[in-house]
Image: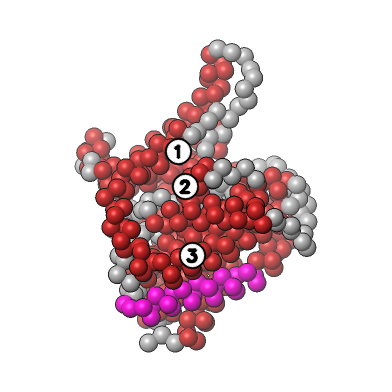
Amino acid sequence: MVTCTTVVLASLTGALAGSLLACVPGLHVYNVIALIVVFSVRLGSAAVLPTEALACAVIGLVVAYAMLSTIPSILLAAPDESAFFTTLPGQRYLQDGRGYAAVWLTVVGSLAGVMATAAGYVLAAPCLLPTVWLVFRPHTHWVLWCVIAFMLLSEWPKGGSLGQAGVHKLAAAWTSLGAGLLTFLLSAMLGFILLHRSPMAPEAAFQNLMPAFIGLFTVPWLLLNGLSRTEIPAQRIEKRIVLERRTFLQGALAGVLGGGFAAFFPVITGGVGAFLAGHATALRNDRAFMISQGAARMVYYAGGLLLLFVPGAALVRGGAAAMLRTLFTPFDRVDFWMAAAAMLIAAASVCLLARPLTCGVLRAMAVCGYRAISWASLGLVALIVFAVTGLMGVLVALVAAAIGLIPLLCGARRMNCLGVILLPMACNLSGFGPQVAAWLGLQ
């Protein structure tokens, strides 16, 4: 039987470790959890931590990452697949010397996400989620196709409306559009290869897509950061950040809707959910936008993991929940309440760490420079990929990085890199995934 002391200590330990790791550019919490799973399987989970304590520590890791990983994604521009929307308004704040304020706006959004997740998890999840999933499950395939269609159709030329008419203007407009479509198709082909004929060793199968996501989203940003000659202006630490109630509520509502949609439906990531919610609620305010991103990330990561603990729901998604399930299986409502308590304890402790860690990263940038930090982070990420998936995983990450550079160099939307999982899963859920794989020569 798990004790209150175990829950508190494990949650605080996970939150502290997750807060420190979240400040490393490009390091995803799923990579860390993958390492925990690898070593726990090799050593025996009981040799690492009792299973209940391990579950609370993983919850603390995820909550801390969801709340504080915006520090490097804004200050060092190294976002993951669910954070790269934050970089546009965040980079504007950074260039104005207000990177600290941008980080705190996303942290405030994360707090709104924690409260919404706790309320929905405790009050509605046990009684509503199983029935809702029973209704929606037969329709997941066409929902996913609608998301893909909206992503591609909402792409818009990045240039202005003035210019030389005719072929030149058409070519300029299709530079970013064509790059976006090419990125989506190439990443989708990579996803089909990894899902139907993976080149990686069988013992790394549980992290089949990890090198691809790192290559698509992490490596290009870190590489360009290391090669960049852009100078980041001096940042000021604002003692007071004024936030209107309407702005907070609008951003929090959009983020909770987007993160909840992404946590509930398979394959949809937090970035896609926030993107859809932003369009649905017509977000135009930068502050509301960053708040929504913080809320969406928290609901997506923490809410998706807590689905594992809902009694009788059988709503385990990918990511942290799937990896944790290899080490720990919830049995009753004690585990349900344990997960809720761990999330709240972790969130409260991470709030206390947000200011000193943000100031610490800013000082490290002033002393070491963001280029040196980016190169060091790139080396660390490469070591993690090698440790989990071996040399073949590193090669897959390099191929994915070449695809991930296309939208960065051509001004296209980086979200198109999510074709690596969206298109293969849409085909599989629709029942013709094997036929597409055979047509591509993968079977």
Which stretch appears magenta?
Answer: 331-353
Horizontally, is 46 left or right of 174 in the view?
Answer: left
Q: Is residue 339 left or right of residue 156?
A: left
Tell me the quadrant of the picture where the N terminus can be found. bottom left
Percent across and percent down for residue 391 are 40, 54
Magenta-drawn stretch contains 429: no
Q: Residues within 10 Å of mark 3 (few under 14, many from 20)?
A: many
> Image quadrant of residue 330?
bottom left
Task: Name the mark on residue 272.
Answer: 2
Amino acid type, mark 3: Thr
Whether residue 1 is visible = yes
Q: How many marks?
A: 3
User: Residue sitting at 45 percent across and 63 percent down?
Assistant: 303
Query: Which mark is on residue 251?
Result: none
First in residue order: circle 3 vs circle 1: 3
Could you say where residue 254 lies in the image, as x and y percent from the top left? 54, 51
**Quadrant of the rendering where the C terminus is positioned:** top left
Question: Tag 3's secondary structure?
Answer: helix
Q: Residue at x 21, y 38 (%)?
A: 435
Q: Tell me where residue 307 appears, x and y as whole percent.
A: 38, 65
Amino acid carrying mark 2 in the image: Val
Label 2 or label 1, whichever comes before in sequence order: 1
**SS type, badge 2:** helix
Observer-side mark, 3 or 1, equals: 3
Residue appearing at x 48%, y 65% in the figure: 117
Up-down relation of residue 163 to residue 377 (above or below):
above
3D distance between C-alphas at marks 3 and 1: 26 Å
User: Which label sits on residue 117?
Assistant: 3
How far apart marks 2 and 3 lie (CA) works out to 18 Å
> Marks 1 and 2: in contact by CB < 8 Å?
yes
Residue position for label 1: 151
